[in-house]
Image (cartoon, grey):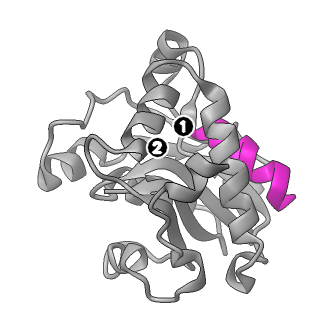
């Protein structure tokens, strides 16, 4: 608990038109967006995310997801969420890593937020190279058309909570939203554990 209390919370879940939401303005339509923490290199946030993503410590995602779910319950704007959806990994990357870190976060959110998780409808169609060292335009170019829906009807008229670990440029999330909006009447809100 003392570790959690020292992390750099954004509190954007309580603020409309926050800096996270502004990143998507003019790109893709979203309802709300927030990140739990600010991300800085060599910080506790970076160490936690690296433990989750590269060291297989799935419980980190679940614990932080529970924290995020508890905070989302405080915001009336997130109360209309129907489903929680992780940003999917390509099957090859999923097989190599053994788990999807975004799904771990979703499971934590679901435990405290009380909404179901859908891990099957939004899929990654194309395996793209890592974006870690790419610039804004390269990231956007690298994510164009890489996601799709197995059954658009399953998301029709629903408010989806799209979940990822870190928001950097937002290009991956934008590509996911473009795929989700193939479903008639679907709306999307976005949450990440951290924002760079």
Give the residue at x 24% y 37%. Answer: 131
Residue 168 drawn above or below residue 78: above
| Prevalent SS, magenta region | helix
Residue 113: quadrant of the picture:
bottom right
Say whether disc 2 or disc 1 marks the residue closer to the N-terminus: 1
Question: Residue at image x 54%, y 37%?
Answer: 88
Q: Residue furthest right?
A: 114
**Do tag 2 and tag 1 residues touch (Cβ < 8 Å)?**
yes
What residue do we see at 51% from left, 56% from top?
6
Residue 18, quarter of the rendered image: bottom left
Instruction: Answer above or below: position of 169 versus 81.
Output: above
Query: For the residue labelled by badge 2, is the local secondary structure a helix, a strand or a loop?
Result: strand
Residue pointed to by mark 1? 88
**Distance (Cα) linking label 2 and label 1:** 8 Å
- Residue 196 lies, with reference to residue 3, above or below; the image says below
Which residue was labeled with disc 2? 147
Q: Outermost residue toward the bottom?
A: 16
Give the side of residue 54 with respect to residue 135, left or right. right
Check residue 45 in the rendering and tell me which mark sits there, or answer none: none
Q: Which residues are magenta?
A: 102-115
Q: Where is the C terminus found, in terms of image quarters?
A: bottom left
Choose mark 2 or mark 1, whichever is in front.
1
Q: Is disc 2 surrounded by few (<14), some (14 to 19) or many (20+) residues within 10 Å?
A: many
Q: Nearer the viewer, residue 24 or 19?
A: 19
Q: Which residue is at 49% across, 55% downward?
A: 7
The location of residue 144, given as percent across then percent down, is 30, 48
- Residue 32 percent across, percent down from the top left: 55, 77
Q: Quadrant of residue 183?
A: bottom right
Q: Residues within 10 Å of mark 1 (few under 14, many from 20)?
A: many
Looking at the image, can residue 103 be seen? Answer: no
Disc 1 on helix, strand or loop? Answer: loop
């Amino acid at each position: 608990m003392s570790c959690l209390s020292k992390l750099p919370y954004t509190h954007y879940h309580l603020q409309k038109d926050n800096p996270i939401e502004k990143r998507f303005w003019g790109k893709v339509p979203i309802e709300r967006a927030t990140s739990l923490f600010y991300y800085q290199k060599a910080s506790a946030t970076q160490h936690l995310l690296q433990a989750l993503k590269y060291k297989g410590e799935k419980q980190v995602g679940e614990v932080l997801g529970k924290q995020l779910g508890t905070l989302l319950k405080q915001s009336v704007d997130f109360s209309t969420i129907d489903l929680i959806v992780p940003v999917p990994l390509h099957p090859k990357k999923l097989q190599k890593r053994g788990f999807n870190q975004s799904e771990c976060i979703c499971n934590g959110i679901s435990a405290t937020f009380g909404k179901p998780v859908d891990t099957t409808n939004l899929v990654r169609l194309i395996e793209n190279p890592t974006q870690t060292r790419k610039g804004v335009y390269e990231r956007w170019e690298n994510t164009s058309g890489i996601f799709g829906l197995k059954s658009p009807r399953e998301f029709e008229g629903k408010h989806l909570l799209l979940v990822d670990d870190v928001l950097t440029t937002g290009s991956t999330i934008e590509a996911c939203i473009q795929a989700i909006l193939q479903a008639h009447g679907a709306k999307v809100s976005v949450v990440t554990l951290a924002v760079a």
